[in-house]
């Protein structure tokens, strides 16, 4: 992705979050100079991967397959028994997040506002493919038995529980969706298993100055 695309995606997400009166922590608005001034005090946000995350899943078409995320809190991935994680996301209308599952993370995905969040679901087979067997999911705490690859709809206020090894693919309809995620410890470096080969973090072309650091920038830029 071009840095200009990333800057614009973050700017749009900030405005979208603000529309729903969701205020981010101060470091969400730091510029590069402020990050360098505060990097010693921000050791936990840096090591735990808190902050902005923009991905096009390596497809090179952010509008078709992409997502903007902000990780608000997270325990440290080296200690999975201490803490939890919380994210806020902006899914644009018809912008697809491809099938993936997690081996470690259990999560609740919540439609916090906007359009309708569509989620396709399937269990994973032992060799990482889509199972043809139905699965049981919990929507707003109530069990539902659904066929493999069937689609459930989450309207604002509704949530779904996603256990490990459950493939999920999602997108927004009838407008962009403000998505919340509450989960066990999150490690995006090693705990995302996609059905097809994708790139979890973007390869960035620096066509304009950085406005906001991504979590994938920390290692190189804040060394």
Image: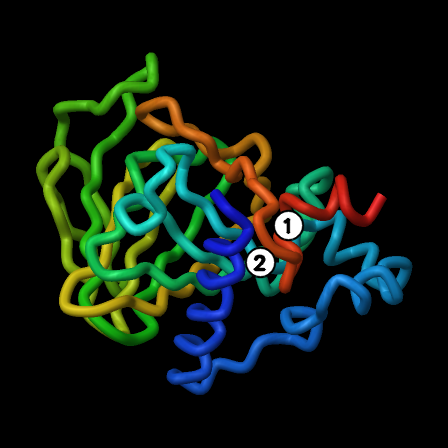
Q: Position of residue 123 (x, y in %)?
A: 25, 30
Q: Residue at x 69, y 77 (%)?
A: 26
Q: Nearer the viewer, residue 74 or 9?
A: 9
Return the mark for residue 215. Answer: 1
Return the mark for residue 52. Answer: 2
Q: Residue at x 65, y 57 (%)?
A: 209
Asked whether the residues under the numbered discs 2 and 1 touch, taking CB atoms below 8 Å apart as contact, a structural biologist would say yes
In the image, residue 49 sits, relative to residue 14, either above or below, namely above
Q: Position of residue 5 (x, y in %)?
A: 46, 54
Q: Classify mark 2: residues with Cα within 10 Å, few (<14), some (14-19) or many (20+).
A: many
- Left or right: where 82 falls relative to 70: right
Q: Quadrant of residue 156?
A: bottom left
Color style of the picture: rainbow
Which type of secondary structure does the marked residue at label 1 adopt? Answer: helix
Q: CA distance from mark 2 to mark 1?
A: 6 Å
Residue furthest to the front: 207
Q: Quadrant of residue 188?
A: top right
In the image, residue 122 sits, relative to residue 216, either above or below, namely above
Q: Residue at x 86, y 65 (%)?
A: 38
Q: Classify mark 1: residues with Cα within 10 Å, few (<14), some (14-19) or many (20+).
A: many
- Left or right: where 30 falls relative to 54: right
Q: Quadrant of residue 32?
A: bottom right
Q: Position of residue 223 (x, y in %)?
A: 85, 43
- Left or right: where 118 falls relative to 66: left
Q: Nearer the viewer, residue 31 or 108?
A: 31
Q: Earlier in the sequence, mark 2 or mark 1?
A: 2
Q: Residue at x 59, y 35 (%)?
A: 189
Q: Nearer the viewer, residue 156 or 80?
A: 156
Q: Position of residue 175 (x, y in %)?
A: 20, 69
How many numbered circles are shown? Answer: 2
């Amino acid at each position: 992705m071009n840095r200009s695309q990333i800057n614009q995606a973050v700017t749009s997400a900030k405005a979208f979050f603000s529309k729903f009166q969701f205020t981010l922590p101060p470091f969400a608005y730091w510029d590069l100079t402020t990050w360098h001034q505060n990097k010693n005090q921000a050791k936990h946000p840096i090591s735990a991967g808190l902050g902005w995350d923009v991905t096009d899943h390596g497809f090179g078409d952010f509008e078709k397959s992409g997502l903007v995320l902000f990780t608000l809190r997270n325990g440290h991935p080296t200690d999975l028994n201490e803490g939890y994680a919380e994210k806020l996301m902006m899914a644009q209308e018809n912008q697809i997040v491809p099938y993936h599952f997690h081996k470690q993370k259990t999560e609740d995905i919540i439609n916090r506002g906007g359009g309708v969040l569509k989620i396709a679901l399937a269990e994973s087979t032992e060799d990482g493919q889509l199972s043809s067997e139905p699965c049981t999911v919990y929507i707003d705490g109530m069990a539902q038995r659904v066929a493999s690859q069937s689609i459930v709809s989450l309207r604002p206020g509704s949530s779904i529980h996603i256990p490990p090894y459950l493939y999920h693919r999602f997108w927004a309809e009838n407008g962009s969706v403000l998505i919340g995620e509450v989960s066990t410890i999150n490690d995006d470096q090693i705990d995302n298993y996609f059905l097809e080969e994708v790139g979890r973090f973007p390869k960035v072309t620096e066509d304009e100055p950085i406005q906001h650091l991504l979590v994938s920038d920390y290692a190189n830029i804040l060394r």
